[in-house]
Image (cartoon, coloured by chain):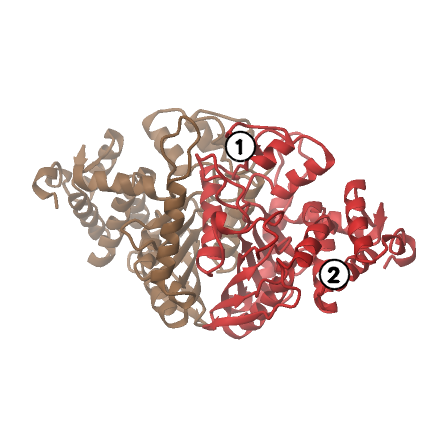
Chain colours: A red, B brown
């Protein structure tokens, strides 16, 4: 089923309004999820609506959090998310971070008592618009064994950064520290398809291509022991340092409905102008991009890509042609809407009416 | 040949004194190199003495740099290294960083006009002693193609962090963003041995196990496109943002003797006490370490290691038993000493006299 992006945002925000979120926060969550679908990262898109709604209904997520700065040292901040939606807390944090970095040049921000914040790209893109190099990371429920281990300890702890380029298309790397995001294995299981070798091991530590066995086992870190080290660093910055949960002490989003997740995040913003004029920086970064794009590719490869370039192209296409949802995802979000008294049919197929 | 660590430091510092470095700076360079040998990272140890001396003698490195802070925004700093030795500039930067982070909580520091700084672990360990989470990264001469490319663009841009644990043994990850540091391929070529598949491609883009062909080709990023993205981020932070060279515009340490390298670095220090009492943080980090160490290992694996643990064990052994240098490295550093009027035989085999 194809949706115009704005219609899909409206549908999703109207669902969240029925479970206690303010209009503004409902929009933030919906906008963030649809932004992931636009970038082709369907694992972090509207497929998450049913579980988010379930956690809100069960009381595991606070729909009206009192998000506040509990430590403020100007260049370091600690934010308490009061167990709200991760997207709402992430949005507030990036806004605070931009203000602080404007004043001070650079800021490190820890966030405690949060929840799954979706795709980090949504937040770091906002720093870029203020000429700030921006990083966001988060820990996540335990799904990845330490290197050499069998039992999950770390989450797929995502690492995200964005670099201003002066064009519509910043450099954005938004990656899981597992070989792939667990969300992609969830998608495969939902769609009933296998996964490639090397993504995961089963609960005995053996390699598997069965998506359901992989969900019972543990995903593998990217780059072997180095990726394990980076996943650990993210858990330390996001969890250990902030007072949030870490390792297996973070609650599972698909279970533990009686408790908040206690996810932690870590953000960094650096105002480019405190190092050199942003205009000069952008000239230099575009020189780098041009040099890489003109660099010879291995035989059989058409083009060398800059991080975020493929997702940006995808977004341009989907803004024009609409977002196609798989039948499984469509059915899932249709049902959750119906349960909340929001009818998906009121938002479908308006692609041709609303192209901007 | 076996050396007591202090004797090896004395030998190396006495060499650097003959080529214009101050006593203090000679000690910093020697101490940093031998620290890498102690940790078993021989690629970044005294094997670098001949090339460093050559660059100093040729005028490509400034033996008496005027290292100064040229932008100071409290939470962001830019340091001009005046084309001195990277170790000397790194040491000065970490000292400035510790002072700033003590006052402000957190600091981001860019460094321009520097040179190869050796192993980043040397610097980040110092932040740990002040209860600071510390990061160091550096760009490096072009040896690694962008993902999908044939021609080197990025260096093996190292990424290093250290986390206080309250024990002698901090968590330290000190990694190249290539599958392995190019220094390991240089060592293999010096020792006349092959390298494993997957480390590098030759100058036609084909996989190679020949260390000499690999040195003419390009090393591969760790973790595929994700490692490529992280290597790019490091070059942006260290090079593009600081005004230093970036990509292929950094001069080769083993050539370009008429010009400074113009390497850039990026440091971050975060005072743990601005988030939570360091004592509490250390209790939490030790809980993480204990839980990982007690986690079941894959069949056939004896023990799960924490980043830096293997290097720490190695260091304990070498502090006791001395540092063994290969014949090739011994001959190389003996020759450079002789050229500078420093006789290596005055520093050899004192292991049994000087154990501490």
Q: Label 2 marks which chain's residue?
A: A
Choose top left, top right, bottom left or bottom right for residue A297.
Answer: top right
Vertical side of B27 occupied by B317: above or below: above
Q: Residue furthest bottom?
A: A103
Query: Residue visible at 59% across and 34% down?
Result: A214
**Are discs 2 and 1 both within one chain?**
yes
Choose top left, top right, bottom left or bottom right for residue B334.
Answer: top left
Dot 2 lies on which element? helix
Query: Residue visible at 66% across and 33% down?
Result: A301
Q: Position of residue B235 (x, y in %)?
A: 50, 51
Answer yes or no: is residue B254 visible.
Answer: no
Pick the residue in front: A43 or B160: A43
Pick the residue in front: B185 or A91: A91
Vertical side of B207 occupied by A240: above or below: below
Q: Position of residue B48 (x, y in %)?
A: 31, 42
Give the labeled residue for mark 2. Answer: A16
Q: Label 1 marks which chain's residue?
A: A
Q: CA distance from mark 2 to mark 1?
A: 36 Å
Q: Position of residue B335 (x, y in %)?
A: 21, 37
Pick the residue in front: A298 or A140: A140
The answer to whether the residues at label 2 and label 1 have Cβ atoms under 8 Å apart is no
Query: Residue visible at 63% across and 49% down?
Result: A290
Q: Position of residue A124 (x, y in %)?
A: 61, 59
Position of the N terminus of chain B by quadrant? top left
Vertical side of B342 occupied by A274: above or below: below
Residue B304 horizontal side relative to residue A227, left or right: left
Label 2: how many residues lie within 10 Å, few (<14), some (14-19) or many (20+)? Answer: many
Label 1: how many residues lie within 10 Å, few (<14), some (14-19) or many (20+)? Answer: some
Residue A292 horizontal side relative to residue B297, left or right: right
Q: Earlier in the sequence, mark 2 or mark 1?
A: 2
Q: Which mark is residue A203?
A: 1
């Amino acid at each position: 089923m194809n949706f115009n992006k704005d219609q899909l945002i409206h549908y999703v925000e109207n669902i969240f309004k029925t479970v206690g979120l303010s209009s503004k926060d409902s929009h933030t969550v919906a906008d963030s999820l649809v932004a992931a679908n636009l970038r082709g990262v369907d694992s972090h898109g509207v497929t998450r609506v049913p579980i988010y709604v379930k956690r809100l209904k069960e009381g595991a997520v606070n729909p009206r959090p009192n998000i506040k700065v509990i430590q403020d040292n100007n260049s370091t901040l600690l934010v308490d998310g009061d167990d709200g939606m991760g997207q709402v807390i992430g949005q507030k944090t990036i806004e605070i971070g931009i203000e602080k970095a404007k004043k001070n040049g650079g800021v490190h921000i820890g966030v405690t008592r949060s929840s799954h914040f979706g795709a980090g790209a949504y937040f770091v893109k906002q720093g870029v618009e203020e000429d700030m190099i921006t990083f966001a990371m988060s820990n996540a429920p335990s799904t990845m064994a330490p290197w050499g281990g069998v039992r999950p300890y770390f989450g797929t702890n995502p690492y995200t950064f964005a670099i201003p380029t002066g064009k519509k298309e910043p450099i954005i790397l938004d990656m899981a520290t597992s070989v792939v995001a667990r969300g992609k294995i969830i998608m495969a299981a939902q769609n009933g398809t296998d996964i490639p070798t090397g993504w995961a091991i089963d609960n005995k530590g053996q390699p598997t291509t069965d998506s359901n066995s992989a969900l019972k086992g543990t995903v593998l870190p990217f780059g072997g022991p180095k990726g394990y080290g980076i996943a650990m660093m993210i858990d330390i910055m996001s969890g250990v340092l902030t007072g949030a949960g870490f390792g297996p002490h973070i609650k599972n989003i698909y279970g533990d409905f009686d408790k908040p997740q206690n996810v932690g995040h870590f953000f960094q913003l650096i105002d480019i102008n405190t190092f050199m004029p942003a205009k000069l920086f952008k000239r230099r970064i575009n020189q780098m991009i041009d040099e890489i794009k003109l660099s010879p590719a291995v035989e059989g490869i058409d083009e060398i890509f800059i991080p975020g370039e493929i997702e940006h192209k995808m977004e341009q296409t989907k803004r024009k042609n609409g977002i196609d949802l798989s039948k499984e995802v469509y059915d899932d979000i249709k049902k959750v809407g119906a349960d909340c008294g929001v009818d998906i049919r009121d938002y479908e197929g308006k692609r041709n009416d609303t192209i901007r």
